[in-house]
Image (cartoon, rainbow, N blue to C red):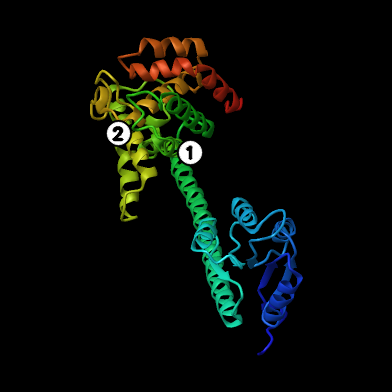
Amino acid sequence: MTEAEPSDRATVLVVDDVPDNLALMVGLLKFRYRVKVANGGLKALELAAQSPQPDLILLDIMMPGTDGYEVCRRLKADPLTQGIPVIFLTARSEVEDETFGLSLGAVDYITKPISPPIVEARVRTQLQLKAAADFLRDRSAYLAAEVARRARENEVLQDVVVLAMASLGETRDNETGNHLRRTQHYVKALAEQLQAHPRFAEVLTPDAIRLLFKSAPLHDIGKVGIPDAILLKPGRLTPEEFEVMKTHTTLGYEAIRRAEESLDEEQPFLRFGKEIALSHQEKWDGSGYPQGLAGEAIPVSARLMALAGVYDALISARVYKPAMSHADARAIILKGRGQHFDPDVVDAFLRVESQFIAIAARFQDRAG
């Protein structure tokens, strides 16, 4: 028999309270495997937990103190050792004994007196099975880690795409990047408050809230298509100019839709972006634009953004108006309950208004 290189050898732990039995098994296995021995159950448990752990355990049943059945039970109950295959090697030959041993998690059951070729064959088989299982487990862990890594990369890519697109509109508007951050967090606060509400629970899942937060900055992306004379006008718009300004909703929706078409499949994070861009100026009573949607016909994402956007516009200073206090903005939003805004969204705002105040303070615009 050719002796394997030490680095290639599997480790077998032999457990028996009879020295002659240990000597027999060591003599049988030592040319092919690293062999460790334990003369009792507690010693076996100690060696099984030590690094490097054995690849296989040959376990006697009839031992004083902690018998083989109890050793096997403890091995399989411990996450650290439960993956080590156990072969019972015992003089107990009753079917009931074998059945019980296998029920405890042993992979095989060999009765004494042993047949060396049988023992060698069964040990070899179980070690091959363990090696295959270890390979598959390691491969599975690697693939899971790789999937997680790529998912994180996709998340980052999505964030970059959204912020890059949103920044196109931002660079041409009077509003600041902090406006995008504030409205993101306002929408998230409202969504989390409403996710247990019967009217919203089906839509506002944790994953949907994550995507809403990601998509919120796209609400005004269409402003990139509005002429500077209108977009940057410091005073009130004329009716004709306002009609042009209103087209930022459809321009934004079409820009996102065309971008999505180039990907050849619908992207969930862009679905909310399309909804928000197109419908965030709709009003609960149907007096909004561009489609004049009312009530439940307005997407939930757009209803949340409607309140978030109005609140932020009210508390923010612009070249054409001073900033309003939270109390004044709150009063206007309450007045719009059931007219401009979904009543339940307004009620959610009242429950999280302290969060709105904190968000506004955290991402406040710099003076000058």
Q: In this rendering, is residue 278 above or below 59?
A: above
Total marks in image? 2
Foreground of the two, 177 or 87: 87
> Where does the image place residue 297, in percent across and percent down from the top left?
24, 27
Residue at x 31% of width, y 53% of height: 265
Quarter of the image with the N terminus is bottom right
Q: CA distance from mark 2 to mark 1?
A: 18 Å
Q: Earlier in the sequence, mark 2 or mark 1?
A: 1
In this image, 190 relative to 127: left or right?
Answer: left
* SS for dot 1: loop
Q: Residues within 10 Å of mark 1 (few under 14, many from 20)?
A: few
In this image, 79 relative to 231: left or right?
Answer: right
Quadrant in which residue 169 is drawn: top left
Q: Residues within 10 Å of mark 2 (few under 14, many from 20)?
A: some
In this image, 90 relative to 257: left or right?
Answer: right
Residue named by callout 1:
171
Amino acid bearing label 1: Thr
Residue named by callout 2:
247
Residue at x 46% of width, y 12% of height: 330
> Where does the image place residue 60, in percent across and percent down from the top left?
65, 64
> Where does the image place residue 174, in percent across and percent down from the top left?
48, 30
Foreground of the two, 249 or 62: 62
* SS for dot 2: loop
